Amino acid sequence: MSQEDIDATKAPLMDHLIELRARLIRSLYAFFAAFLVCFYFSRTIYNILTR
């Protein structure tokens, strides 16, 4: 394997890592939004679960 082959494979890896980072950040935003919604309705959710 030559140095050119190694350099050619680095770009796709970086593209995948950038995409992974973007998806993880979006997942954290979605998780935080769901947490806030559940926190707002926490008493209602608790009452439903205790029945």
Image (cartoon, rainbow, N blue to C red):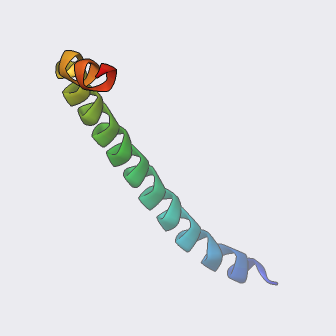
Q: Which of the 4 quarters of the picture holds residue 10? A: bottom right
Q: What x and y, as percent, mark residue 41?
A: 18, 22
Residue 8 lies in what quarter of the image?
bottom right
Q: Residue at (47%, 56%) from the top-left corner?
A: 20
How many numbered marks appear?
0
Q: Position of residue 13 (x, y in %)?
A: 58, 67
Give the position of the C terminus as an image quadrant.
top left
Q: Residue at x 32, y 47 (%)?
A: 26
Residue 14 rendering spot, x and y as whole percentages: 53, 63
Q: Quadrant of the N terminus?
A: bottom right
Residue 47 placement, left or right of 10: left
- Single out the residue that lies furthest toward the front: 51
Q: State the image coordinates of residue 42 (x, y, percent, origin top left).
A: 24, 19
43 or 38: nearer the viewer = 43
- Above/below status of 2 relative to 17: below
Residue located 37% across and 39% down the image: 28
Depicted 3 relative to depicted 35: above or below: below
**Outermost residue, top direction?**
43
